[in-house]
Amino acid sequence: MTTTNSTDQHPPARSEFASDFLWGCATSSYQIEGAGFEDGRVESIWDRFAATPGKVKGGASGAVACDHYHRWPEDFDIGRDMGLNAYRFSIAWPRIFSEIGGKPNTKGLDFYSRLVDGMLERGLQPWATLYHWDLPQFLQDRGGWAERGTVDAFLEFTDAMTRRLGDRVQHWITHNEPWCTSMIGNWEGLHAPGFTDFATALQVCHHVLLSHGKAVPLIRANVPDAQVGLSLSLHPLRAASSSAEDEAARLRHDGLRYRWFLDPLYGRGYPQATLDIIGDAAPAIHPGDMDAIAVPTDFLGVNYYFPETIQDAPGEGPLSVRVLKPQDAETTALGWEVAPEGLAELLARIESDYHPGPMYITENGSCYDDVVVADGSVPDAERRAYLQRHLAALRDVIDGGVPVKGYFAWSLVDNFEWAEGYGRRFGLVHIDYDTQQRTLKDSGKWYRSFLRQE
Ligand code: FCB
């Protein structure tokens, strides 16, 4: 079913956005770099998880991925030619540290230094994410993020990277999607390290948020004029019906999925109603932790893909809720609902609940089963429409006064889509994994003409 609304009837134009608006694409280290064990990189939790039978579709891993480690000049040329003025990437911690208390690996530092120079040479403002899920396995062996000591290890990593890149990289994202790091990786068990324990996930979450809070002043100390924030994955939430039970379920889910992150980040502590529900599963919190987490930031990164519909489900999980699959809605190849109005709804809500200051869409994109056709093109009309409609919704919500300052499409290139392996394509650029050939999809061509105002 295709929906139409006012957003769909008025296509977006770049001239409708501020002239200093950032236009980027986002990627992450494990999903694109490959070069799994080159230049001193050590094992990450994703290497271990991918090597565990049954965890990743097709037994795939990021060992080769898009070979971006060697092909980044070509990828950045494509980004420049598309008309991007910003690029979001992440840094593989296992390229930098190979043991507790060790020295940073010069070859790893040099790689990211070259990468940043490559962006700057092409007019791409670098946006560095410190943690996009590839924790070194040696830290997981000591308990990973469930261990408080990992916060200190993260600060060492942060210190090394900001010292090395801080003369050229002003924009830093401490964490990508703490929900996924903690809940998908440690409660749902679908991502590395693959645990299924709710209390562990909540402890992980607390340490991730704490490491964010402690990293912010460190980054500011090392980087002149630093702009620091983090990226949350958020969904607008809808109740499955108008019943009081479903509405109460929606609020319970909201407490964990939205407020659990935003309330502490903006100084309100963890929501009491959620603490009451989770009881003994609550994380250990040391004095001063909540103040550290509430450190003021320069921006909020929002990753938006789809809305969630919540149903009351007594006895199901700690919250007695069920997230429903979309019914009668337009969906992508991953079954994610296509709902551009959800982006506007979400941003307006965050603005009214927290006034976080500048916001950036640090990820937004769609998965379709793309193919290269006979004339060599990749006709991904659905992704192109997804992009257009979300940019139109973004324009409208900005016109309504919500301070969004940039948009990063997920993703520049097709890549390793975590537990889904390589079958799920999100790129504006198609990758042939046999030949590593890059082909700009029709969606990428549209983004190019939008950005160049052709
Ligand atoms: C987000 C992740 C990103 C990518 C997209 C599709 O949750 O941050 O790495 O996998 O989903």
Image (spheres, rainbow, N blue to C red):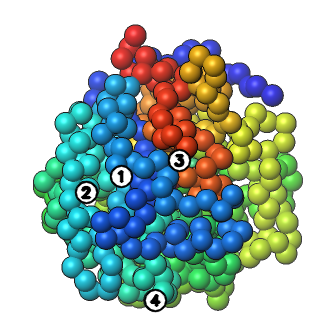
Residue 433 drawn at (x, y percent): 55, 44
SS of the residue at dot 2? helix
Q: Earlier in the sequence, mark 3 or mark 4?
A: 4
Check contact, mark 3 vs mark 4: CB within 8 A. Answer: no
Identify residue type, mark 2. Answer: Phe
Q: Quadrant of the C terminus?
A: top left
Q: Position of residue 257 (x, y in %)?
A: 61, 62
Q: Is residue 441 above or below residue 338?
A: above
- Give the number of the mark in front: 4 or 1: 1
Amino acid type of the residue tagged 1 in the rendering: Tyr
- The structure residue drawn at horizontal position 60% and vertical position 41%, both measured from the top left corner, is 425
Question: Pointer 2: what residue?
Answer: 111
Find out whether the residues at labels 1 and 2 contact each other: C-beta distance under 8 Å: yes
Q: Earlier in the sequence, mark 2 or mark 3?
A: 2
Mark 3 or mark 4, which is nearer to you?
3
Q: Is residue 282 visible?
A: yes
Q: CA distance from mark 1 to mark 3?
A: 13 Å
Label 1, secondary structure: give it.
helix
Instruction: Decide which of tag 1 and tag 3 comes sooner along the chain.
Output: 1
Query: Label 3 sits on what residue type?
Result: Asn
